[in-house]
Amino acid sequence: GSVGQPLDNLDVKIDKDGEILVKGPSVMKGYYKNPEQTKEAFSEDGYFKTGDIGYIDDEGFLIITDRKKEMFKTSGGKYIAPQVIENMAKSSRFIEQIMVVGDGEKMPCALVQPDFTFVKRWAEIHKVNIGTKPEEMVKSAELKQRIEKEIAKLNEKLGNWEQIKKIELTPDVWTVGNGMLTPTMKLRRKIIKEKYIDLYNKLYEKEA
């Protein structure tokens, strides 16, 4: 979201990987008695690395879109900000949760948890037989094709390197209780990937 326009005494610029860099009298000068950490925290020309990804819009407002630690790089060297793509994807009624993957892989893909309540109603209205239990629904070719249409619409808004090339549907509702979400409803990416490693391998056609 927007954090407003930068203060007059603050110099803000966007690094080539999208990270927001700042310099000014109100910015910390370094870590006390820790020159190594200080060196890591600043760019070569003295800007503080905020760890946030964003951009400055046409009206001069600073927009934060993601945290840098959430970003990953494909094998082709392109940076992907998954949270931005995930938030866009969740505007679809069919998608309750989604995790974009592809760190070190040739392309971004996604694990998708459908909105099973909505999907059930959709199937009834359109007389599509997808079963009644989540584990049956995610095996439905019709449902997967319908969600792929939603992903295709999303991809139209993304750069070619960011586009989700393949998806797999997961049969569980992702919750705080089952460890897949943090208490603040963020994805526990490592846990989700480990749980669905077979689906992940299927996305990238890897041997288990």
Image: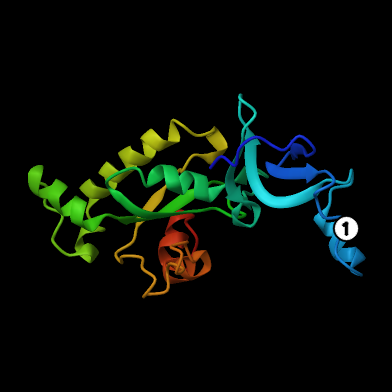
Is 13 or 153 nearer to us in this picture?
A: 13
Q: Is residue 26 left or right of residue 179?
A: right
Q: Which amino acid type is marked by label 1?
A: Lys
Q: Residue at x 15, y 46 (%)?
A: 122
Place residue 12 in its image quadrant. Answer: top right
Q: Residue at x 41, y 37 (%)?
A: 154
- Label 1 secondary element: helix
Is 193 or 179 nearer to us in this picture?
A: 179
Number of marks in the image? 1
Circle 1 sits on which residue? 39
Q: Is residue 171 left or right of residue 194?
A: left
**Where is residue 174 shown, x and y percent of the image?**
36, 65
Place residue 138 in its image quadrant. Answer: bottom left
Q: Is residue 85 left or right of residue 12?
A: left
Is 139 or 88 nearer to us in this picture?
A: 88
**Where is residue 95 shown, x and y percent of the image?**
32, 50
**Where is residue 132 shown, x and y percent of the image?**
13, 61
**Where is residue 38 shown, x and y percent of the image?**
86, 60
Residues packed near mark 1 inside 10 Å, few (<14), some (14 to 19) or many (20 plus): some
Against 9, residue 176 (above or below) is below
Place residue 140 in its image quadrant. Answer: bottom left
Q: Residue at x 21, y 46 (%)?
A: 142
